[in-house]
Image: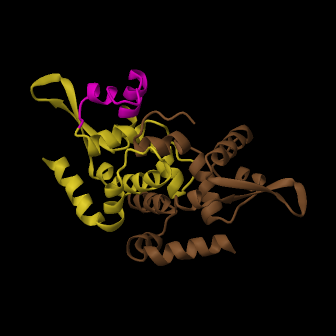
Chain colours: A yellow, B brown
């Protein structure tokens, strides 16, 4: 990846500054998805060439890692690395912001309340689910 | 703006899911910039047509607001709205993440430490500077 500057905000945008990459991270983090086909089925309707490109870039940037699926070695299983899991606080702040400003947000008031008032426990729950 | 879903992460990406929009918000939030020409001078090198497009979209989405500059009414002064200022926690988490994973990050250890351990005061300082 070619960095545009040493600005930390620019660094993140160089990696995931597009409409799709963080949706893949979301699917891995909150939705228990781990297969190519599962990401493709997300309701935002990612095109297959975009998905392939973003998975490749996320893997190059060590946000995700892929391994052959034991039961069918032509399939890959994608998981978040430590660097990927560490995007969780950013995702939670995004959920809180959108929950406040999008009147039709899928983020419930209870969830936004937990982000603001019970964050450590919420984060531990999300990360515990990942390790199962 | 056409929403792809009611997902709160998708909502933010529908608005600022590109390599540039959050750099404009950064310039307003942390760098005291408020003029078109100032955004253009940022070291990431934004093209003028992209800058014009992103300012328009940020204004449509009520993240920023523009007013004629009193001393030269052909110039506009851009400022963050409440909705725009409320992006601060997201930006701080981004700075902390990049400070951890980009070895050449411009984010100092001291700043990342403050994000993690002195957030309320840090946020108040940033927002105080904005209102001056």
Q: Is residue B52 visible?
A: yes
Q: Position of residue B80 (x, y in %)?
A: 64, 59
Q: Position of residue A10 (x, y in %)?
A: 53, 51
Instruction: Name the foreground residue: A28 vs B69.
Output: B69
Q: Position of residue B48 (x, y in %)?
A: 74, 41
Left/right of residue B28 with respect to residue A39 in the rendered view: right
Q: Picture quarter containing residue B25?
A: bottom right
Instruction: Name the foreground residue: A76 vs B9.
Output: B9
Residue A14 is one of the magenta-drawn residues: no
Q: Position of residue B20 (x, y in %)?
A: 60, 45
Q: Is residue B42 visible?
A: no
Residue A51 is one of the magenta-drawn residues: yes
Q: Residue at x 70, y 54 (%)?
A: B65
Q: In this picture, which residue range is highlighted in magenta? A: A33-55
Instruction: Name the foreground residue: A96 vs B23.
Output: A96
Note whether A58 is above or below B102 in the view shown: above
Note whether A51 is above or below B20 in the view shown: above
């Amino acid at each position: 990846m070619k960095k545009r500057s040493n600005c930390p905000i620019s660094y993140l945008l160089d990696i995931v500054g597009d409409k799709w990459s963080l949706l893949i991270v979301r699917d891995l983090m909150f939705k228990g998805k781990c297969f190519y086909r599962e990401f493709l089925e997300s309701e935002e309707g990612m095109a297959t060439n975009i998905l392939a490109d973003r998975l490749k870039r996320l893997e190059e940037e060590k946000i995700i890692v892929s391994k052959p699926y034991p039961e069918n070695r032509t399939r890959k299983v994608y998981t978040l690395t430590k660097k990927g899991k560490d995007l969780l606080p950013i995702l939670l702040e995004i959920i809180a912001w959108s929950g406040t400003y999008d009147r039709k947000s899928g983020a419930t008031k209870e969830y936004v309340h937990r982000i603001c008032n019970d964050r450590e426990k919420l984060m531990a729950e999300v990360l515990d689910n990942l390790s199962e």
